[in-house]
Amino acid sequence: MAALCRGRHRWKKINSLHIFTRSLTGKYEYDLVVIGGGSGGLACSKEAAQLGQKVAVLDYVEPSVKGTKWGLGGTCVNVGCIPKKLMHQAALLGTAVKDAKKYGWQISEPVSHDWATMAEGVQNHVRSLNWGHRVQLQDKKVKYLNMKGSLVDEHTVKGLTKAGKEMILTAKNIVIATGGRPKYPTHVPGAMEHGITSDDIFWLKQSPGKTLVIGASYVALECAGFLTGIGLDTTVMVRSIALRGFDQQMAGLVTDYMEAYGTKFAWKCVPRSVDKLSSGALQVTWMDTQTGKEQKDTYDSVLWAVGRAPETKALGLDKVGVQLNNETGKIVVGADESTSVPNIYAFGDISEGRPELTPTAIKAGKLLARRLAGQSAELMNYDNVPTTVFTPLEYGCVGLSEEEAERRHGTDAIEVYHAFYKPLEFTVAERDASQCYIKVVCERRGDQKILGLHFTGPNAGEVTQGFAMSFQCGATYSHLLQTVGIHPTCAEELIKLNITKRSGLDATVTGC
């Protein structure tokens, strides 16, 4: 009772639940409460805990429209980067089997792929990561709560269990890192009833069969790529352009390769309806916007990849005044990840103007934790973030696209060095290398600072990661020329670039 008499206290009544907070002492139950247990939220919480902060993480996965659900770790671990890369690897192995014959391997026909075996292996690995995250939180003394989190005020979070039990947590600071979920085109009849999204594809127990992928984002192309690679009849329906926001010359090389690889494309088409036939097949009706004609075909699965929506609706942001971008629904944030409400922060996919990439969320989360703990003032640098699209022919890039460089600097102020090359691995296998291409976009004058680097070819992610560091050091074209290559590699071709687009000369690499 003596404790209750010290200081001034206040009671709040929220949703018939009484909450006791201490306003005079300024003390709270936690230093930091994180809503969202994805890669960014987990990184932020663990970093804060290591810096001596008392931390809690709330994470709850709403099942997809199709009922798919998963464990701790967010999109990347469960329905994104990790299962995607593993299924991409399955497809690459299928191509490798074909190449192997040319290299002398005696492989008996027919070679076939079993979806269930692949899915079980991938899903078991994901579950091991779910468990690993829980163990790490426990080891670092972060309180994990399998609850939906929502805001009550700038220092209070309400947690709600699946069974409807409520818990109130108070914190000095609150971080929102709830990411996003795939969109359905609700204006298309049958889309939600009969379609799936990337939230479902990696958890299917049985093969999706003949599949129509609708969309042209990296998610759409990556999924279509590995489905084709494991032998499924796959079509991509594209409304306008592929890989919007990426360099469009590179996007064209990616889709050209995919078409040669066996993926079908329905360009300039928009879906009208999806109907389930008595046979169980899905009949899709679409409009060809170039001809104005309506067309139909049947598929076993329809995969929607038409964008992602931020998970903001159930957070109670409007109650506390957190500002959103009305167009995108994302949270408006400052350079320090702060929102319009003091003590509430947001980062990752849920934040306006941020790359929707796992590594940026992880790094931003760690830096935020350090700032909130008073250990650092360093802000996240969102410039020159590298990324890779894991299509059958991988595409890695860092820095500006050629279009963006022209927009910012003017066509006459940039120089583009480029080359078409043939990976050594493709030679004996007699594989077409028409789309294996490199370009480096530079400032034309002065030291020719590198503005953008683009690469299509094997192991694009590994190649791009290495060169990405040079962007942090202000790399120039002369730095490239001064670098000694590792022979014989695909990455080596980057440091041999000597032909400019402006010259009009043939950029095909000859010899080794």
Image (spheres, grey):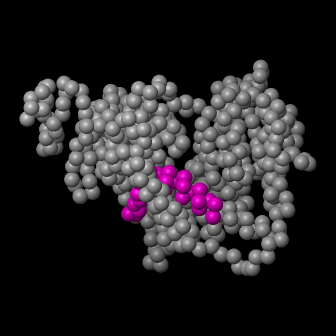
Looking at the rendered image, the quarter that the N terminus falls into is top left
Q: Quadrant of residue 440?
A: top right
Q: Quadrant of residue 18?
A: top left
- The answer to if 85 sits in the magenta stretch is yes
One can see residue 299 in this view = no
Direction right: furthest residue = 511
Residues 407 and 36: in front is 36
Main secondary-structure element of the magenta-colored stretch: helix
Q: Residue at x 70, y 54 (%)?
A: 393
Q: Residue at x 33, y 29 (%)?
A: 343
- The answer to if 74 sits in the magenta stretch is yes
x, y percent for residue 345: 38, 33
Q: Residue at x 21, y 26 (%)?
A: 25
Image: 383 above or below 178:
above
x, y percent for residue 453: 71, 37
One can see residue 131 in this view = yes
x, y percent for residue 17: 14, 43
468 left or right, relative to 12: right
Q: In this picture, which residue range is highlighted in magenta?
A: 66-90
30 left or right, relative to 489: left
x, y percent for residue 481: 82, 32
411 left or right, relative to 87: right
Image: 137 above or below 224:
above
Q: Quadrant of residue 63?
A: bottom left
Q: How many marks?
A: 0
Residues 35 and 98: in front is 35
